[in-house]
Each structure stands twice: as C-alpha cells, then as structure tokens.
Amino acid sequence: MNIPASVSRFGRVALFLAVSWMPFVMSCPSGENLPSGSQQTLFTNAQDLPVAVQGGPSDVAVGDMNNDGKPDLVVAFGQERAIAVLEGRGDGKFGGAVSTTTLTEPPGDMAIGDLNGDGKLDVAITSHDSYGVTLLTGDGKGGLSKAPNSPFSMKPTGQHPHTHGLAVADMNRDNKLDLITCNNADNDISIAFGDGRGNFTLAAKSFPVGPSPYPFGLGDVNNDGWPDIVATASATGPSRREQLPLSRALTLLLSNNKGSFTPHQLPIRTGEPWFAAIADLNRDGKADIVATHHEINALTVMIGDGRGGFTEATGSPFDFGAAFLEVAIADVNHDASMDIVATTGDKIRVLLGDGRGTFKPASSIPVGPGAWRFTSADLNADGATDIVTSNSEGNSLSVLLGLRRNN
C-alpha cells in the first residue's frame, strides 16, 4: 500500500454514529438537484483534494492514536487487507502513515476505543463475510498489533456471516467497553460484554430485528441513563420479495438495565430503512431518530416522547432529491439546532435543522466516487465540524473543512 506524501497536506475528520457498508450492494443515484437559492457554503475543500491513496479505502475513523492530544486518522483498505494510521498535526493536516497493519480478511466496519483499559486507543474491525471482530491493540505511539484473543466471534452459530455494522460502547454501565455488531443475514444484533482487559463474553442470546439490518443507531431514548439500539430493515437479502412487507418498521431494542434488551417495533410510512442515527432534533431534551432508505429518495424523521415512544414527524418521509446512505447528526452551522449530514455515493449532503424537527437542504458537496463511509470531528481545534469521506471507487480520501465557530 502506497500512501503518498500528499496525505500530509490535508485535514479533518470525526462524527456521531457508528455504521457499516459494503461496496457491492450500493447503487448510487445521480442527477440530484438542490432547490434554487438553497446552496450554502458550510464546508470548503481542504487543499490538494481528493488525496490519492492506493488499496481501496473502505472505512475511515478518527482518534488520538499516539497520545499527543491531536486527532489521527485510521483508514481501512479493503483491497490491501490493511489498516493504516495517519498522524494528525492538530491543524487539520496529517502526516504519512505512522503504521500499517496487515489483516487476514478484508476490513469492513471499524470502531475505536480503549478496549483493554491501558489508556491507549485500540481498534475493532469486522469483516463482511465473518462473525469475527478483529481487535488491534494500540501502543500509544500509533502502532497496532493483533490481540492474542483475536478475532473474537460475535456469533458461534448462525445462518450466514454477513456483518453490516459495528460499535463499541458501554452497554451494561460497568465502565468497560462492549462490542455490538449487526448480522445482516441473520436479522439480529449481537453484543459481547468487555471485562476492561480486552476479553469479551457474548450475551446469552442475540436480539432479533427486522429483515436485512444495516448499521444501527445507539442512544438513550427513554432518559433512563442506559444506551438503547435502533435497528433498520433494508430487506436486501435473497428473500427480498418476502421481506419487503416486513420492512416498514424500525426495531427499538430497549435496555432492561440488566444487559439485555426488549424489542419494540416502530412503524414507519416508507419501507427499507437503511442507516439510522439518534439525537435530539427539536431541542426538547428527548431523543429522536432519523433513518435513510435503501435506494429511495426519502428521509424518515421520528420524534421521541422521552419514554421510548416515537411518532413519525409531519411531512416525513422527506424527499430531498437523492437517496442517502450513511447519515450522521451534528450542529454544523452553530445555531444550537441539530443538522443532518449524509452521503449519496459521490457527494456529501447537508440538511439544516430548525430546532423543531424540520430540515431544509443547504449544501451538496462533490467528493470522490464510492463515498459511502465518512466520519466527522473538529480536527484543527477551531470549534467546527469537519468531514472525511473514504472514496472506495476512487482510491482517495476527501476532506471538507467546516465553518469556524464565532465565539
């Protein structure tokens, strides 16, 4: 894998939600248009973009991998079966690869966290055709090495390994990070509880959700202090015809505060929900949900009642002229209202929220082909949200710099 010197001249990353996607199922729409006068300058291209990288970048994440107080990039390369750490300089620019780690299988989803309690960030990685999660232990200097117990199987038995989603979070409130994966072909979610030393124990059972789930949303939807899960139902499996009638709902896995979850169906007007995210969209202190739909120009918005109940917003689903893929929620224009950022395969779309659960299109920003995965964060300490896309079909990374916050 050859990461050119030009990598040192770009900047930015981060985000809100965890997700996954594999290239061969994507069919990206074209011809999207924004209403006249709606285009706003919320992001600018970093210099020398897109940045060329070889090896088929399939995912990107951000974290301070070398403990210097500056965010770094972690990039997965599907074709090369490798993970590279690019050193951040703290000003939105990055140096070359600090380390490159070779894997036995093509990497899928990534999630970053201190999984063994040593104060250094580690990386968890799925592979599309495996139940296993590979654990790479960080040395605090940007280096990664395969953990002795890796890969960890998230499902000893199942119909067919087909992983589309990964997150690390403390699901049982023991101050230790756990693993959560989405099993697309088995229509369920698996959870493994961490012991804080890099070891994991599977939950007694997996948790059934809708047909062909994709990356899920995590958040406390009933204000009890425990994280819950919202799963989608894309109905993209081999039994698609039979699955479609069952795809008009999200599945809420509500924590029972004992490390287990109770499923609740959340009916929606449009089927095939694809990616989901959770945040307070209308500033009432209660979690809401947004969901994209498989190759459909629709965005579903669900307003929460703070007790785990949801009602689809008036006017939802919204048609913004494009089918969205991965979606995240952040305040990109600094007005204290949550906005939506989504990929469309070769563009980043920004929808500005009004603080009442309604959105309007603001920007459509070209990036690289195959931009299904992205992450966002403030990489240069200017108070703005920045975006990095992994352009799998273009062998490149695109970096968008957010508007500086005015203090």
Image (spheres, helix red, strand yellow):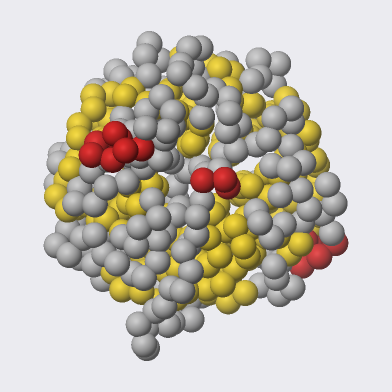
Single out the residue that lies furthest toward the bottom: 37
Eyeballing the image, is 391 above or below 196?
below
Front in this rendered view, residue 196 or 266? 266
Location of residue 137 by image quarter = top right
Q: In which quadrant will I find the C terminus? A: bottom left
Q: Residue at x 52, y 73 (%)?
A: 365
Q: Is residue 203 left or right of residue 379?
A: left
Instruction: State the residue at coordinates (28%, 23%).
Output: 261
Q: Residue at x 24, y 36 (%)?
A: 246
221 versus 161 height, above or below: below
Disc tally is 0
**Residue 60, horizontal then vertical, whole percent:** 62, 49
Q: Position of residue 57 (x, y in %)?
A: 68, 50
- Judge by depth and name the residue closer to the eye, 166 or 140: 166
| Image x and y of residue 243, in percent | 30, 35
333 vs 144: above or below: below
Residue at 71% over, 49% down: 56
Res 277 visible: no
Q: Position of residue 101 (x, y in %)?
A: 78, 35
